Amino acid sequence: MQLLTGRCLCEAISYEIRGELGPIFNCHCSKCRRWHGAAFRTRATINASQFAWLSGEDNLARYYSSEFVVKHFCKVCGSNLISTYENEPDKIGIPLGGLDQAPNNRPEGHFWVSSKSPWYEISDSLPQHETWPGSHAYIRTTSNDR
C-alpha cells in the first residue's frame, strides 16, 4: 500500500494519505489558477478514510470557493492543502504540489483548458478537455471507485 505525506510551506501542518490516489488531472480553471497562483492545479481525489492530519490541524483556515467546495489552507503561510465537498463528505481533493513523495500514478490529462491562462501553452501530449473529462463525477473518482 502506498503511503504519501505532505505539508505546508512553513511545515506547521502535515498530513498522510494511505493508499492509491484517484485519477490525476491538471485543472486550468480560473479558480484553481487563482488558488495556486500558477498556470494550473495538479490534483487527485481520495477517500476521506485514506487521509489523516499528522500535525498542525489548529493552523487550518477554510474558504468556501463555491456552494459545496471548501478549500483548506494554512493560516500561517497560506499553503493550499485540501478541498472537501459538503455534498460528498467521503471524498477529499488533493493538490499534488504539497506531497513529499511521488504518487504511483501520473496525470491523465488537462481539463478546463477553455479557461486556461493565455500566457501558458500546454506542451505535453496528454489529452486536453475544454471542460470536464467526460463528467464532473470522473474528477472525483477515487481508487476504490475504479
Image: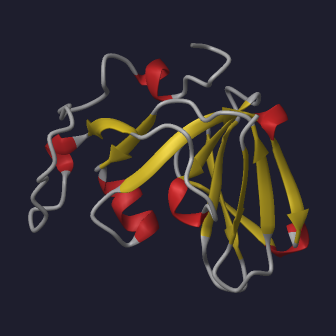
Residue 105 in percent (x, y) is at 49, 37
Q: Quadrant of residue 99?
A: bottom right
Specify whether 120 is left or right of 110. Answer: left
Residue 130 in percent (x, y) is at 17, 33
Q: How is the image coloured?
A: secondary structure
Residue 95 vs residue 71, the one in the foreground: 95
Residue 45 vs residue 63, the one in the foreground: 45
Specify whether 67 is left or right of 13. Answer: left
Residue 3 in percent (x, y) is at 75, 47
Residue at (68, 17) in percent of width and height:
144
Q: Quadrant of residue 133?
A: top left
Residue 52 in percent (x, y) is at 86, 50
From this viewpoint, is residue 67 visible?
no
Residue at (11, 53) in percent of width and height:
123
Above or below for 94 versus 1: below
Residue 97 vs residue 64, the one in the foreground: 97
Specify whether 13 is left or right of 130. Answer: right
Q: Considering the image in quadrants, where does the N terminus appear?
A: top right
Most extreme residue toward the top, as rendered? 146
From this viewpoint, is residue 139 visible?
yes
Count of labels shown? 0
Q: Considering the image in quadrants, where does the C terminus appear?
A: top right
Residue at (37, 18) in percent of width and height:
135
Above or below for 9 versus 86: below
Q: Quadrant of residue 13?
A: bottom right
Residue at (62, 23) in percent of width and height:
143
